[in-house]
């Protein structure tokens, strides 16, 4: 039965690993909540040997598009008020969305972090949301915690990881620009959004009763210059939320530890430092971002208002152009949504 108004959109970016997508999707379909649509965002054509278009909306990003680009394309085709970003291959558990969705009854909650568990060692937590150090360092909260202690991870967090994240959609979807910032890269986009939510006056919480299993991923390696530039963009975009004085005082220590100076990798550290310096040439864009974020926080401080009447969190033009064709989509006419 087709519904005009799903309660939840599950957005899964598929970066070419069709076997992992098919395996993870089985668990999502087995545990699928009511009034839910599933949106699959592909970065290369998929033959659909199992007729999955009867169960999900297919969206085609540019060939070879990265994680952030696929999410931005897929998000434009999500219709529900709450969007659940779920990594390709992640395994859902029974009723994993129920406790997470209940938090959105509080209008101040902008995002919810489920507990992500190692699929190979199902007693070990991979992540229970994000932490962010004042100097610009992203860390995954709760990593290595025994699952028996997961209840202690409940409470406020900086935000969820993109492997499993619930977002209030109207805080993300802009009128023209992308929701997730391409300029900070795939590895930092989740904490960038989380800091924008925090800067606008919204909270994020971890819900231990919401659990997904995540298979191990091969770490991607970014060139040092690009990694340094992305990290500095994140720092500049987030510093007003932390407080400039505190952020700048902690920044040097963060650079020394994150870029490799302390470990003696001087060639990589020098390239990363050059990338960080390049990010400062984008200061005019950062200033516009900061100004709009301040306005957004002032509006939120005035009290609850219809979300549709509030400015979106994507506050400035993207710092990097998406590849041509990123915003094209192939969406079947029928969308399968549980009644």
Image (cartoon, rainbow, N blue to C red):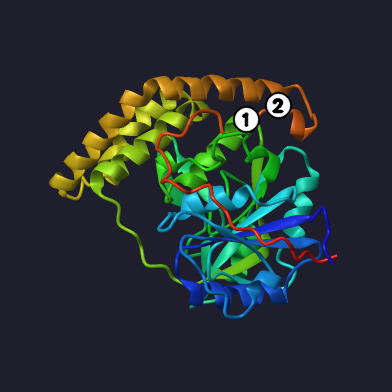
Distance from disc 1 to disc 2, alpha carbons, whole Å, reads 7 Å
Q: In terms of image quadrants, where is residue 319?
A: top left
Q: Is residue 324 above or below residue 253?
A: below
Q: Is residue 44 above or below residue 71?
A: below
Q: Quadrant of the C terminus?
A: bottom right
Instruction: Judge by depth and name the residue closer to the eye, 229 or 151.
Output: 229
Which tag, 1 or 2, sits closer to the chain's start? Answer: 1
Q: Is residue 305 above or below residue 89?
A: above
Instruction: Judge by depth and name the residue closer to the eye, 145 or 208.
Output: 208
Secondary structure beneath label 2 = helix
> What crowding class fits label 1: few (fewer than 14 Cα within 10 Å), some (14-19), or many (20 or more)?
many
Q: In terms of image quadrants, where is residue 114?
A: bottom right
Q: Quadrant of the N terminus?
A: bottom right
Q: How many marks?
A: 2
State whether residue 166 appears in this view. yes
Q: In terms of image quadrants, where is residue 116?
A: bottom right
- Contact flag, marks 1 and 2 (Cβ < 8 Å): yes
State whether residue 93 appears in this view. no
**Residue 16 % position (x, y):** 44, 67
Quick check: 151 left or right of 89?
right
Q: Which residue is mark 2?
A: 300
Q: Which residue is mark 1?
A: 200
Residue at 52% of width from left, 58% of height from top?
Answer: 142
Secondary structure beneath label 1 = loop
Instruction: Judge by depth and name the residue closer to the eye, 262 or 323.
Output: 323
Quick check: 54 left or right of 89?
right
């Amino acid at each position: 039965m087709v519904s005009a108004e799903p309660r939840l959109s599950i957005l899964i970016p598929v970066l070419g690993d069709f076997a992992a997508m098919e395996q993870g999707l089985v668990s999502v379909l087995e545990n699928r909540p009511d009034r839910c649509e599933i949106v699959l965002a592909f970065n290369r054509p998929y033959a659909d040997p199992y007729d999955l278009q009867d169960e999900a909306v297919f969206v085609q990003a540019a060939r070879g598009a990265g994680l952030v680009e696929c999410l931005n394309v897929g998000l434009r085709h999500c219709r529900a008020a709450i969007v659940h970003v779920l990594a390709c291959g992640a395994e859902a558990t029974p009723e994993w969305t129920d406790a997470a969705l209940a938090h959105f009854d509080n209008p101040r909650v902008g995002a919810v972090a489920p507990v992500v568990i190692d699929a190979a060692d199902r007693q070990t937590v991979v992540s229970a949301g994000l932490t962010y150090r004042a100097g610009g360092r992203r860390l995954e909260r709760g990593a290595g915690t025994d699952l028996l202690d997961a209840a202690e991870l409940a409470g406020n967090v900086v935000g969820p990881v993109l492997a499993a994240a619930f977002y209030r959609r109207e805080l993300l979807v802009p009128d023209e620009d992308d929701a997730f910032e391409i300029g900070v890269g795939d590895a930092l986009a989740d904490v960038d959004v989380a800091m924008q939510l925090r800067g606008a006056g919204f909270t994020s919480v971890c819900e231990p009763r919401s659990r997904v299993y995540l298979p191990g991923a091969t770490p991607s390696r970014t060139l040092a210059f690009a990694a340094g530039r992305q990290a500095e963009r994140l720092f500049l975009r987030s510093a007003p939320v932390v407080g400039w004085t505190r952020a700048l005082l902690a920044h040097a220590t963060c650079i020394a530890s994150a870029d490799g100076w302390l470990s003696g990798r001087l060639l990589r550290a020098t390239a990363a430092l050059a990338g960080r310096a390049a990010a400062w040439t984008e200061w005019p864009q950062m200033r516009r971002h900061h100004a709009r974020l301040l306005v957004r926080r002032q509006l939120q401080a005035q009290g609850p208002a219809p979300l549709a009447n509030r400015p979106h969190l994507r506050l400035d033009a993207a710092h990097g152009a998406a590849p041509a064709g990123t915003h094209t989509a192939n969406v079947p006419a029928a969308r399968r949504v549980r009644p």
